[in-house]
Image (spheres, rainbow, N blue to C red):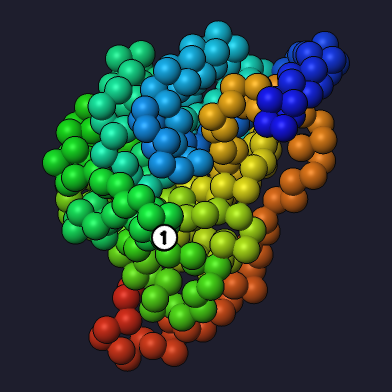
Amino acid sequence: MVDWKHGLLGAYYAVTLPYRQVVNARAARQGNAPLIVLFYHRIADDHPNAWTVSNQTFARQIRWLQTRFDLISLEETQRRIDSGRNTRPAVSITFDDGYAENCQRALPLLLKEGIACTYFVSTQHILSGQPFPHDVANGRPLQPNTPEQLRALSDAGLEIAAHTRTHADLGKIADTQTLYDEVIGSVKDLETLLDRRVRYFAFPFGLHANLNAAAFHLARQAGLEAVCSAYGGYNFAGDDSFHLQRIHADPQLIRLKNWLMVDPRKRAAVQRFEYGSEAAHRLTQARRASEGDAEFPRLRVGLM
């Protein structure tokens, strides 16, 4: 069944590719080429879960990307969005969680090729060495990155960014203090560890149900430059550059090709999460109500 589906997907890609190439070329001429943010989790040659990609597959995907896209940083992605015009399709590489095996071959490959990467980590697991809860639940606890690895990656030029303290589902959290601890607390953890400013935050899980409008506003008020979701979605010039929509880097290259060559079906199906002004109002009210409470966190981050 899997091979049959793979073949069908390959046929669909081949049949629709000429049309997509024409549409994408027209979009580029009009300054509306896509700005795609990919996210990976773990690159290794064992397969304990669905979110591990082999080193060979990762290298093959990177080679394919290099021939077809500008590979740019999140900062450059935001710059192109804010400029209102993008004439070349571009991809930004990100990772979530923080797995030790990524340091063996995947991240050294990116560094060798000079490819920008933003590496989102859940800080409590980095600092304690405890495996991620989803891996424990899967019966295959895996080793997170160590603090020493993160320092080395940061010194080598990778952008290290926050992914909560405990890999929490922020969509289930209503308490402002808890939300602050997970979002801004993880930023402070990293700034202390790396002695560098942390600029970005990514929601764990990242689907619509896992997002939290108040967390967007916490991040903005704390001076972070962008927040990333993970429900699949393209970014275009003129969009909201504070909320960067991301697409999962599928282990199957054909699925990745379908996403990155802008499948019109997927573009039409994905609805952007709107974090609105109501959540900001509730957050401001919560802060005002706690002005006299020395324990309530002020929305400021160190090393600004």
Tell me: 154 left or right of 172.
left
Relative to 108, is 225 above or below? below
Q: Looking at the picture, how far across and down is residue 39, in whole percent?
A: 50, 37
Q: Sort mark 1 into few (<14), some (14-19) or many (20+) by Cα contacts within 10 Å.
A: few
Residue 154 image-quadrant placement: top left
Question: Where is mark 1, residue-wise?
Answer: 137
Front residue of 98 and 226: 98
| Residue type, label 1 | Ala
For the point 17% across and 46% down, which residue is it? 147
Q: Spot the residue most to the front.
A: 1
For the point 57% across and 62% down, which residue is it? 210
Tell me: 59 left or right of 148.
right
Quadrant housing the N terminus: top right
For the point 24% across and 52% down, which residue is it? 126
For the point 75% across and 50% down, which residue is it? 271
Q: Looking at the picture, how far across and down is residue 294, in whole percent?
A: 26, 85
Q: Looking at the picture, how far across and down is residue 140, in whole percent?
A: 35, 50
Q: Spot the residue most to the left.
A: 148
